[in-house]
Amino acid sequence: MSITQFLFGRPLATEERAGERVGPLAGVGILGLDALASACYGPEALLTVLLPAGTLGLQYMPWITAVIVGLLGVVFVSYRQTLGAYPNGGGAYTVAKENLGTSAALIAAAALALDYLLNAAVAISAGVGALCSAVPRLLPHTLPLCLGLLLLLTLINLRGVRATGMVFMLPTYAFVACLLAVIGIGIFKLQLASALPLPRHVPSPAGASAVSSWILLRAFANGCTAMTGVEAVSNGVPMFHEPSVVGARRTLTLIILMLAVLLVGITLLCVGFGVTATPPGQAGYQSVISRVAAVTVGRGVLYDATLASVIAVLALSANTSFAAFPALCQFLAADRFLPEAFQHRGRRLALSFGIIVLAVLAGLLLIIFGGVTDALIPLFAVGALLAFTMSQAGMVAHWRKQRGAHAAKAMGLNAVGAVATGVTLLVVLTSKLVQGAWLTVLLVAGMLVTFWRVRRHYEFVARVTQTQTSLEVGPSLPPIAVVPLRRWDALSLKALRFASGFAERVVAVQVLAGDADSDLQARWSTLAVEPAQRLGFCPPELVVIPSPYRQLMDPLLDHVLELGAHNPERQIAVVIPELVEPRWYHYLLHSHTAALLKALLRLRGGPQVVIVSTPWYLKDWVPERQKLVHRGGWLRRLRARDQRGPAGA
């Protein structure tokens, strides 16, 4: 078994794509980890803002959580309608493009792409941070652990959708089960003590109403981080079994239901047991989830299992980005706003290029921030809420085109969703502007510029390459073949033979750039001219160019361009001998002038130059290879091949 097959599995044919689809239970693990993990850091982010108010701030937590859960319900109803109206996926981008125009669609796509990228880096950092909190001796290794986890997630996703779903189902449902157990035990204890908390009004100190209102707005904005990841299902509809819309709706229902229960349950326990946040980054810091679990079930087996599942889900919640980001990029690439490589499926039918690009960008963020990405958290909810708003506004325009009572009712629901998410977006932007939300605006603008520049490039290429001219075969002058030589060897011989087969004039060019290069002029007549004359075709010319400053490429390129300038009616075919090694590590032993020459010819050669490569395979043609290889099975195979003879010239 090769390393590639061990890491990624056997290749999957296009016809096997249906077998890679998943159901709702696996869909929650693939697309819902980000949303479910936010039940850990959403309440903590809310309580962190309320820290200056002390225990008084806990009295406001149920009301703020109720608003967030209500907003989740609005988003849920709205996105259920989106899934039915646009069953091919695309989410906010597709909805906005069809109903609000291309510019609005690209704003939604840029916001979502940024949100997915930030989530990938922050989720991995949060998971590793939680692990290092539990095992402090790992703290110096934070960045290597982050990069190792990123690599693991990348490899898992490159194995395909079905394999990813199987891997993430266990930690997802273990996390939900542990938290539900903690919440159930906690509520039972509160009921026994007749202390089940109810939201009640707590008067604020006189003159503090304006400050309190601002604190509450900031707490609400921080709590809205619990909404990130909900939109991922709308981008991943095609990954579900047919009927895919039914599977996507059930997955969305499970995610929203579990998230709402977890948020409400954690809120009840925080208020009932008086659990507040501790100042982050300071000595004695402990997460809200850890404190709630400790006060509810003690520091026993269930506590350890809960914390382990929380750490696992926080670390693995980046997988939502690995599922949704490539899908979004595929839609953008189909419309020529991103490179077409984002459309192609890889070995396991996964959108491999998008997965790799996300991994590279997230890795850069982790390296820049040293594996501690807390500074990126203020940018989080802005992208998701902007995408929510664009999607719901697009659905309002969609239903306006329809007729009937159902369309009117649906339009009303989406209008409520658009207003609710739009107002929330304004609140979050206002409250987080000085914390870095302004950077989101700049990044989204930069991505929009990138999208349009990519689109203009594709339009330019299509315009200049378009032609209605038919293939007209007629008399034309044969090309002039140029064969670069370093020495006379089997590589040069193969290239010269090939060039002589299609060109009347063959020019061999030798650049003497070093002391080891031997001048071929004295032997050229014997090696090339006389054999060619005996066979009755024009012998190749030899041009030797001394290079006193040991430059190889420039003299060769100058000669090719000069030859083209003197023969403007002919094409110049540069035939490049190229050595192909039998093992990848053999490439470390040789210079790669052939690859460099091809790259320079593409950049500087111009339309008159044609590049032809003549590969020479070392494993088939070295006559003394028995002396150079290890003894064993490979040697026996090579000797058997010797008996059959070489594969060709």
Image (cartoon, rainbow, N blue to C red):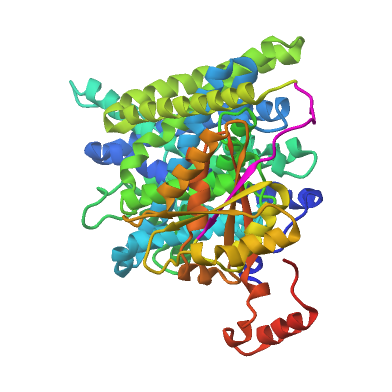
Q: Is residue 130 above or below residue 95?
A: below
Q: Image point 30% across, 47% down: which residue?
A: 277
Magenta-span inclusion, residue 470: yes
121 vs 617, nearest the viewer: 617
In the figure, is residue 190 to the left or right of 236? left
* Magenta extent: 469-485
Q: Image point 39% across, 21% down: which residue?
A: 426
491 vs 242, nearest the viewer: 491
Q: For the view shown, which residue lies furthest in the left direction?
A: 207
Quadrant position of the N terminus in the picture = bottom right
Magenta-span inclusion, residue 633: no
Residue 107 % position (x, y):
50, 24
Residue 645 % position (x, y):
77, 77
- Can residue 264 be seen? no
Q: Is residue 419 above or below residue 166?
A: above
Q: Is residue 157 above or below residue 138?
A: above
Q: Is residue 409 above or below residue 112?
A: above
Residue 41 % position (x, y):
40, 45
